[in-house]
Amino acid sequence: MSPRTGLDMPTILRNAAEIADQEGIEAVTLASLAKKLNIRPPSLYNHFDGLTGLRKHLAIHGLERLYEKLSYAAIGRSGDEAVYRLGIAYVDFARTHPGLYEATLLAPDPADQDVQQAGQKIVDLATRVLSVYGLKDDAALHAVRGLRSILHGFASLEQRGGFGLPLSLDKSLSLLIQAFLAGIHVMKQNGEE
């Protein structure tokens, strides 16, 4: 059976991402997606293998969109400004696309080569941005892990309403990124390469 004319993977993923962002990742099912696309659920099997296949493609789509946002934020910048802009862009992506962001974390098989390749582009970008600090090999990867952990932790807590005090979230995020940068400068001064 051939796919329906006009129904392609970008259209499917855009609609699945809309469901995820509006209702949460768990609301993305073959039935809900088919209803949104005004097709029968079996028609989706022409494009991927069931819900597992949909989640894999959605995870890759999310990682690619996140990479685009991060790379745009870092273009033409270096050092502290590039790291700061990268951090703001990361959290902004999670704010703007909460369901799609969650999809990037819930890939059905994290060892899947396609998912790994999409995620590796983000790691490579962060490594390039942090390269100006002279961190090499393991130290560079530790710094990338640290930055991702800080940003993901902040984004996750914010999404789940974990910041109940009446303080500016943007100011908290800015201070957090500045603290990370201060630590990177200390690593550089101590020659932790």
Image: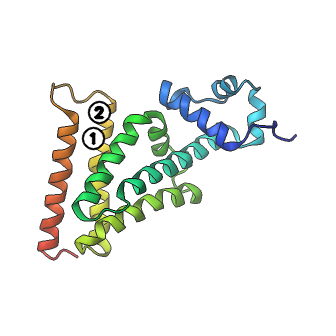
Q: Say which residue appears at 86% left-offset and 41% top-offset.
A: 2
Q: Hey, which quadrant is residue 160 in on the image?
A: top left
For mark 2, does the 10 Å Cα neighbourhood hold few (<14), some (14 to 19), or many (20 or more) residues? some
The residue located at (32%, 53%) in the rendering is: 86
Residue 52 sits above or below residue 158 on the image: below
Q: Is residue 134 above or below residue 32?
A: below
Which secondary structure, mark 2?
Answer: helix
Q: Residues within 10 Å of mark 1 (few under 14, many from 20)?
A: some
Q: Which residue: 48% across, 45% down?
A: 104
What is the CA distance from the residue labelled 1 to the residue labelled 2? 6 Å
Q: Amino acid at mark 2?
A: Glu
Q: At x 69% / y 38%, what residue is drawn?
A: 50
Q: Residue furthest front?
A: 76
Q: Secondary structure at mark 1?
A: helix
**Residue 130 falls left or right of residue 102:** left
The quarter of the rendered structure image containing the N terminus is top right
Say if mark 1 contacts mark 2, CB within 8 Å: yes
Query: Picture coordinates of residue 142 (x, y %)?
Result: 28, 64
Q: Nearer the viewer, residue 33 or 15?
A: 15
| Residue 121 visible in rendering | yes
Viewport quadrant of the C terminus: bottom left
| Residue 24 in view (yes/no) | no
Residue at image mark 1: 154
Q: Which residue is mark 2?
A: 158
Q: Is residue 110 left or right of residue 179?
A: right
Q: Amino acid at mark 1?
A: Phe
How far across and down, in percent of the image, does residue 13 sit? 61, 39
Residue 49 lies, in percent from the top left, at 71, 43
Please determine whether, in this image, residue 37 is positioned above or below residue 44.
Answer: above
